[in-house]
Amino acid sequence: MTNRVAIVAVEQLGPEECANDNVRDLTFRVSKNLLNQVGLKREDVGTIVSSSSDFWQGISCSNSVYYDALGAYLKNSSKTEEDGAFAFIYGAMRIMSGHYDTCIVHAITKGSEIPGLSTLTNLYADPFFQRPIGLDDVSTAALQAMLYMNKYKITEEQAAKVVVKNLGNALDNPYAHKKGKFSVEDVLKSRTMAYPIKELDCATYSDGTCALLLTSEEKAKKMTKNPVWLRGMGWCVDHQFFGDRDLLDGALRKAARMAYATAGIKSPSKEINVAEICEPYSFQELLYYEQLGFCGEGEGGKFIDKGNTTMKGKLPVNPSGGVLAHNPYVARGLLRIAEAALQLMGKAEKHQVDGVKTALAHSTHGLAGQHHSVVILGK
Amino acid sequence: MAKEEARIMEGKVSLPYRWALGPVFSRFFDEIKNKKIMGTKCPKCRRVLVPARKFCPRCFEDNLEWVQVSDKGKIRTWSMITFEFSGQPKPPPYICALVDLDGADTSLSHFIDGVDMTDLEKVRDQVHIGMRVEAKWSDNRQGNIMDIAYFKPM
Amino acid sequence: MARRAAIIGVGQTKHGRREDVNYVELIYEAVKAAIADAGISPDDIEAVAQGSMPSPMEGVNANHLYWADAMTAFGKPLLRTATCGSVGMSIAHLATYHITSGMFDMVLAVGAQKMFEGDPQGTMATVADPWFQRWFIAGAPGVFSMQAHQYMYRYNLPEERVREAAARISVNHHDNAMDNPYAHLRFKVTMEDVMKSRIIAYPTRLMDVCPSSDGACAVIFASEEKAKKMGRKVAWVKGMNYAGDEHFFGDSDKVVWEAAIVAAKKAYQQAGITNPRKELDVAEVYNPFTYQELIFYECFGFCDFGKACELVEDGVVLRGGELPCDPSGGVLCTNPIGATGLLRVAEAALQVTGRAGDRQIAGAKTALAHAMGGACQFNGIMIVGSEL
């Protein structure tokens, strides 16, 4: 990596605040809070990259409506679409180029305003072959889960443990939307959406936004004693035809390999202290343990059975509650990075994991994770 | 002081579309009307891609050979859908699946039917990964993917 | 910028009404052409940067996922940007940052649109916020006609004079398109044709306005190391910038248009350009509407404010002039919006590397490419040159 990139500050707005306001004014609030936190003015910021989605917003050219709310008036600000992690990746590249030394990255989604997750994700499918079959986020996750269960004998109970863990963790996250003490029984008894996916196996629709301040190494050292460093990032996309894809070994392994290579990580399960993973469906968290190299192929179920990924486990996953607890679809990818950064800064308060030196943030979007990204942060 | 109430404004965006098929998909659907399922074979990797494509996404080659694949195959994965959403092709319950047709190297997404869908347990008795299925052709074929009405257990 | 990037190959489709291909195949056509032009293999592409107008335009959400295979992106890093009409430039900037960040040496940029498959004006109306502006913006013609009117009255210019200058631009660009085998509209028009054509939104007439097109553009960016191995001229990225206004159309002046002025100014600084009119050999200016092009000439410093009509009347910006604009025919003759801004970059690259065929401006070494987006909200610039 040519120039180092640091995260010096993180801001997010909670679901209640987001429910009552529009995307423009919420963007202003989170951006202004970020500037206030570090004592900067709008003029001091070099560039801004935001992530949002036209379909999710019902307002096309989605950043147009909130451009000036980012403080971007007459600035060079761009927009990446569909994944909050994209904003981070692009923002980091702008810093790495040496062209800018400060960059605000931002993402926003108001899940409460949309026609429906399935309606919008059904629109990912091509109109000729896959849309008429109703392929959407939920049905494709179910098709993937069936394969996963069939090949490795993963059980619905093991998947349910993800729900119990994450919604339980969310009780200690004031910014999470859905939280509570659930049992495996609760999950198994919830309404079947698309077998084997049940209602509690699914993420909800949430409103959320966050903003992070990225800086060059020089700037970071002037601004804080506690910068979080970008150690590596990778991202990757799979085939468009659902039937072309290896649903159990797709783009995530490649994205992770790319990130680990730059970060110099050889043994992820040993070297990563905490992971924030996008798990819109419970089964996927287990599969993603494997693809991220936390455990061997087919061992995702056993990995959670051993309690490895609880708050007290050897590799806590989703101390924030993850996407099952809070799913502002596009913003969720940037929220994973924000939460990972907070862990490293020691600012995760009630859901802080001890002794974090290296954190992983993962994001995914597209049917059954057609696209994945992995970001490794360190102290 | 009374709490300010934030209001909600409702709206709808409704847009019409007319999608071009291109000659490859057009031919695929012409053949489907004749109860033939066609794939295209990549000269480099030799994989047969179904539905037929203009190019191989791995080799990026477009000199593909048309081959017919069977209308019989096995279920790679399936799920029964029991929830509703706006824009859904039909009201639930219905079963969607990926089918590996004999002769094809990619899976085709379609419906499974010809099974009792009154409850999930019954379905799980009748439908399995790896199970052999065959196309049930529509009587009234229009030249689209629904010319195959569904795949049914053999 | 410490690390340098260059354009080593470009590809585009034949633009127009392309019902002979589906959306994915349209992309494939442009990408294949770019790969052939650069003389590389698909595996050499390390990452892909994509963009387009809003997904509702063709009714497929997150179309980077839809186009993935056609862009060689399977198993590779892929990012999507979307900034309305300026997206083509945003894609070019995004691809450049992939290189200048040091992360990649060879990146493919792809932009496209298939406007005949949807309702473009209906889609564009959804750009305006639903709370205040959506009823009144009347799509693109409404906004740009209001801007045109402002321009005429700001400088106390007789309407007839401005109308004639705009018409002259139209005649010139339609002429230029005759030399561009990829252009959508390829027919000559006379001054009378333009000035008597049907009024769309006063004062804009049919011949003052761009078409809706299907089309795709692919551009390959490379690091200095890879570019120097090409063994032929490449188009170095010498400067780039972008600036945006507020969302509300009424918040800023769109005649002395700061977003356009600032975008150009910083790009010129990076490229070491102090006198654009003299130092630029050719400019591909984003011009969906003839009147708007007059405003861009002024904001980009080709002449003083209020003097764009003279620039046209003296032939400075026409073919054969000192600073010919849009030798490709520009947006006025070809407008697959997601590709359009990237086409400006591609055309600029072809010009400075001497590969623009019949539309080549002799001896061109430095070119400006520009794209505009939103309801007069965004402007992006890239300066390319054949010499470092």
Image: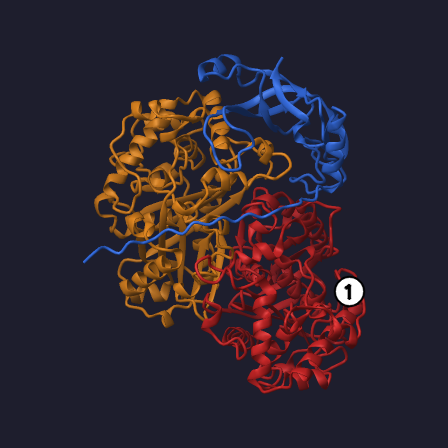
Image coordinates of residue C147 in percent, x first then y, are 57, 74
Residue in the foreground of this view, choosing between C86 and B76: C86
The subunit letter for the residue under badge 1 reads C
Residue B128 against residue C101 in the figure, above or below: above
Q: Is residue A222 visible?
A: yes
From the viewer's perspective, tell me whether residue A6 is left or right of residue B153. left
> Disc 1 marks which amino acid?
Asn
Residue A14 against residue B29 in the figure, above or below: below
Image coordinates of residue C275 in percent, x first then y, are 60, 84
Q: Callout 1: few (<14), some (14-19), or many (20+) C-alpha neighbours within 10 Å?
A: many
The residue sitting at 36% across, 52% down in the picture is A209
Chain A drawn colour = orange
Q: Quadrant of residue C198?
A: bottom right
Q: Quadrant of residue C172?
A: bottom right
Residue A139 against residue C264 in the figure, above or below: above
Residue A36 against residue C275 in the figure, above or below: above
Please give the letter of the chain rendered in red: C
Mark 1, secondary structure of its residue: loop
Q: Is residue A272 visible?
A: no
Image coordinates of residue A369 in percent, x first then y, are 49, 38
Q: Which residue is mark 1?
A: C180
The residue sitting at 30% across, 44% down in the picture is A176
Please give the letter of the chain rendered in blue: B
